[in-house]
Image (tube, coloured by chain):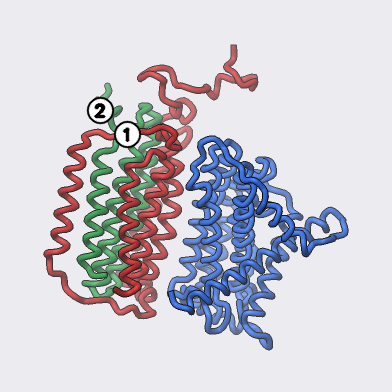
Amino acid sequence: MTLPAVLVVVALLVGIGLYGALSQQSFVMLMMGLELMMNGVLLAAVGLWSFAAGGIPKGQLLVIVVLAVMALEMAIGFALVVAVYRERQADTTEALETLRG
Amino acid sequence: MTAVDVFFYLLSAIAVVAGWRVFRTDSMVRASFFLLTSFLTVGGIALLLAAPYLGAAVLFMMAVEMMVMALFMVMFMMNPAGLNPMNMVHQSRFAIGAGVVAGVSLAVLALVVRFPRHPVEPSADLISRLGHELLGDSMLIFESAGVAIVATMVCTVVLSSASGRYGNATSGSRPPGLEPGGEPAGRRPDSDDDADGGDDE
Amino acid sequence: MSAGSFIVLFIVGLALVAGVYVVAVFDSLAAAWVAARRPSGILLLPIRRAAFLVVQQHNETERPDEAGWRLAPALYLALAATGFGLIPLSASFVPIDGPAGIVLWGAMEALAIVAIFLHGWSANAMLPLIGAYRFVALGLSILLVSMFVLIAAALPAESMRMMDLVDSQRELWNVVRQPLGLPLLLLVAMTLSFWGPFNFADSADLATGTASEVSGPPLLVWKLSRAAMLVSFSALAATLFLGGWLGPWLPGPVWLALKTVLILAVLAGMGRLAGRVSTERMITAAWVVLLPISFLHLAWAGVEALS
């Protein structure tokens, strides 16, 4: 278990997450791609904290902030998805292609 | 190859495969729980990397988040149980290309860059040092995160309350039409006043 | 896996089996008491019921999520067992030790909600689905109350390690220091093991909800897991509020067992004595009543720990 091994896993997670975020039509699946990318970022932060930063407390603080940001992004994302659906009956990115009005 | 190494390779394999299966499975609830598996294994790796509180916090928070995600998947996806095969992708080749480029370039960086070597000592007071840091030097960050959370709570309630300004829940939250732009499919909730199971005549 | 970890697994398994048996016996006793009936054959009844379920045929529905359906009870049982493993059994023995034991327990609670939802969802039937949704709505609300109770219990110990939590109770048990804690934790325990008045997942008005399409060995595993979760929660309540293995003459594990059995008796009694609350009222109560009470409880614990 070395730092390059952890970061290769991060690279895979970010790659798969990016594929998901770019390729999915539905809003919630797109958000799942974003969540997967942030999963990779979380793992990278923990790995770098553990191997390269000597366990300084600010490293753990960064991980906690990333965790909080993930939760907030999911909450606002879902609220926006609900609001968009109520306004325009749109649940895929395709349906929001044209500006209305 | 110590036991820790074996666990690490096992957990990371599960994380990557589960992350892949999120976008390849038909059942939407299973997709959320595959994502949960990916998060749980990352939490496990954090526990292996001598970050006990962070690993436990990731396990805890991601379980709740993915439970809510599963509920939203059932709300918004047309195939929540995977009873039919489904493939809802667009710009698939571009997305695959972008994912491969991002993954390969990050992997190359991971293997080539020389990171400083300063491993953590798994001492017992990591958590208390984190606590002192959170409420000491980084109190501003911690409190801003708290304020951000309150702001988010207010925003979500404003955006999605039942009689809010972004659409009334009863008239806006209807199923999509059977053809695009058509009448909403399914029973209309306010058209059955005598509660006999059908629309009012 | 070393021999030591096998012994640990064996001890945890044995304790859980004994605890599950005690839960079943107490439940029958409480039922007999409520019905003003003389209890007879109580000690053999759980074993007879288990044997019946083992040979009963298991039910199928149309296009269930087969993997999830069979995995959910096993997952719930594993979570109950892992939770039990986090609890200090004596002065020097914790099956799963770690600096953040109490946060791991919270993680087990959160994952239990996932397992119960999966059990109800996977059956592809109406009543289990309603049970699963009702339970998720309530479980996520109660999880906040549970977090505050756990944090407040960790405050006097100034540590998140379970052993330190027990050590902090050497002079005074937490049930005296933090009076609101034990009732709140018992409420949380009954909600997350959907027991008695807080049985929203397998309620009688849904014809046992998430278990309504289950029969045979899967039903046995589900009932075992539910009782095991109750045992783990009772052991947690005994550890956090009644001093765990602390006690004068008898060895540590015996004290823990006695305190756990006491709390199991209370829970089994409440399981039969109180009627089920309606779902909407319970959700309102969880956010409007229980959450402020748990804030007060945490503030009280903080003030008490600072002085």
Please name whichever residue, C2 or C120, is drawn nearer the observer in this view of the structure.
Answer: C2
Q: Residue B184 falls in which quadrant of the image? A: top left
SS class, disc 2:
loop
Q: Residue at x 31, y 51 (%)?
A: A36
Report the residue that reaches farthest toward the front.
C55
- Find residue C213 and report its horizontal and vertical position in percent: 61, 42
Please name whichever residue, B195 or C121, is drawn nearer the observer in this view of the structure.
Answer: C121
Residue C156 makes an appearance in the image: no
Q: Which chain is blue?
A: C
Label 1 sits on residue:
B87
Q: Residue B30 falls in which quadrant of the image? A: top left
- Find residue C169 and report its horizontal and vertical position in percent: 58, 80
Label 2 sits on residue:
A97
Please name whichever residue, B147 or B181, is drawn nearer the observer in this view of the structure.
Answer: B181
Name the quadrant of the N terminus of chain C: bottom left
SS class, disc 1:
loop
> Which chain does the numbered disc 2 sit on?
A
Rendered colour, chain B: red
Q: Is residue C103 above or below residue B72?
A: below
Q: Which chain is green?
A: A
Please name whichever residue, C226 or C303, is drawn nearer the observer in this view of the structure.
Answer: C226
Report the residue that reaches farthest toward the top.
B201
- Crowding near the residue tagged with mark 2, few <14, some 14–19, many ≥20 C-alpha atoms within 10 Å: few
- Find residue A97 and report its horizontal and vertical position in percent: 25, 28
